[in-house]
Image (tube, rainbow, N blue to C red):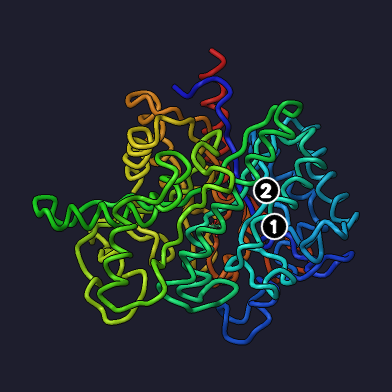
Amino acid sequence: MFPCGFAWGAATAAYQIEGGWEADGKGASIWDTFCHEKGRVFGEHNGDIACNSYELWDRDLECIQQLGLTHYRLSLSWSRLLPDGTTEHVNQKGVQYYNKVIDDLLVCNVTPMVTLYHFDLPQALQDKGGWKSASVASLFDSYARFCFQTFGDRVKLWITINEPYVCAKLGHEDGIHAPGLKEPGTAAYLVGHNMLRAHAMAWHSYDSLYRPKQKGAVSLAINSDWVEPLHPGCPDHVAAAERLLAFSLGWFAWPVFVTGDYPEIMRSAIDAQSERLGHSGGSRLPSFSEDEPQVLGTADFFALNYYTSRKVKPGGGHGRTLCMKSDRDAEEVLDPSWPISGVSWLAVVPDGIRKLLNYIKDTCNNPAVYITENGFAQVGPLQIEDERRCEFYKDTILEVAKAVGEDKVNVRGYFAWSLLDNFEWADGTSVRFGLFHVDFSDTQRRRTVYRSGQEYAKMIQKYKSDQSR
Ligand code: GAL
């Protein structure tokens, strides 16, 4: 039922697991800075040590092998490789670390999928304006070329940027992620724009300079909830759901997969709201320049991070202040019939993934899709027998199977978030997404498989043997 060569993976990200925040010449990232400021993160937690994967990579590799993964998605820390963010100064210890990780994976027959940017901008570049500054795009391109050049002989699956939506909105509109800016209604659009420019430049660099020899594939990871109108019979609810989807998935998928530009709904809403509120200085949503590398067509597959679903009704559009909520005029509602996982935002809606996959197939020209993240959070007392997470993975993977088998969506792989309990951003280590438990009170950061890890391993084994029949 899953195609031959289907990727069965798990994902992590550098800042969330590595620790070693200033080891061996690593430069600081915006998450180092953010966590070291008081009151930013739950319980003043930080990723200084995290799972200590910088020193304990061998343990992680054992976990990967124990699950029987065919693929492992990791991210590179930009400031571990290039401490000041530029290729002027390369930290060889960082190169050695990732060389070992990649080589070890390949020896064990595990295919690496490598993300270049997972929320952790070098602080040195933040000091020069960060993602709000237009020049960050070419600095990202140089970093990407450096990575393709250094690791691309062995890495064939690349993600340039993870969840530009989250970086833009949580980091620059809501201020709850690094760099902690609260500039509602303006900065997020600018940041999203520069991320798209950066991604497109890196994809073109790969395409012209590295693809002919390295023969890999490059994309960006787009996160989106599945959304439905609260009252499907009400046209304004239907329109609100469309707007919300345009402001989440569409924001990044339309420029890359559909039109080369932002969704029309988004453009007209932002323009109208700017005018209504008397905003001066042109549209707050930037335009793509014809003098720059084209954004349309800059993905070799669709990388989707899916966690949850929402019902939607109109709301928030008549505020007096500029902000994204007011631009999109769509209010999210949690359906009371959906159970909640450990965190309040994560309603468990396995069939949402099937609907979203079909939406992507229908609107984005039926691309090959990798589900690059999907998972279930646990909070409170530790439960190694995590029955609900077992159910979650079983139900979700069944929905993916239906999308593949019945709906003919071209899904090529599934990555569980996450291999390990780790530093869950603003929630610190209080929220646990791992297939392995990590004991953060133990200096050795002991890893223990959850029941869900064992069940995932069994599913992988079963599906793999179905494939080979
Ligand atoms: C994603 C993010 C991951 C992980 C996950 C669970 O937005 O890419 O790093 O934290 O959410 O919240």
Question: Would residue 354 be seen by someone viewing this image from the given angle?
Answer: yes
Judged left or right of residue 120, residue 330 is left
**Residue at which label 2 appears:** 74
Mark 2 or mark 1, which is nearer the start of the sequence? 1
Question: Would residue 388 be seen by someone viewing this image from the given angle?
Answer: no
Q: Quadrant of residue 248?
A: bottom left
Picture coordinates of residue 116, whole percent (x, y): 68, 50
Q: Residue at x 48, y 34 (%)?
A: 369
Quadrant where the N terminus lies? top left
**Hey, what amino acid is under mark 2?**
Leu
Q: Nearer the viewer, residue 77 or 13?
A: 77
Residue at the bottom extreme of this rendering? 38
Q: Quadrant of residue 416?
A: top right
Picture coordinates of residue 17, whole percent (x, y): 69, 59
Q: Are marks 1 and 2 in contact (CB under 8 Å)?
A: yes
Picture coordinates of residue 266, whole percent (x, y): 33, 57
Q: Nearer the viewer, residue 204 or 231?
A: 204
Give the CA distance from mark 1 to mark 2: 7 Å
Q: Residue at x 38, y 77 (%)?
A: 280
Q: Residue at x 32, y 72 (%)?
A: 274
> Is residue 378 shown above or below 371?
below
> Is residue 18 shown above or below 301?
below
> Is residue 28 shown above or below 294?
below
**Residue at which label 1 appears:** 14
Give the structural element (helix, strand or loop) at label 1: helix
Q: Nearer the viewer, residue 223 or 404?
A: 223
Judged left or right of residue 451, residue 258 is left
Q: Residues within 10 Å of mark 1 (few under 14, many from 20)?
A: many
Q: Quadrant of residue 32?
A: bottom right
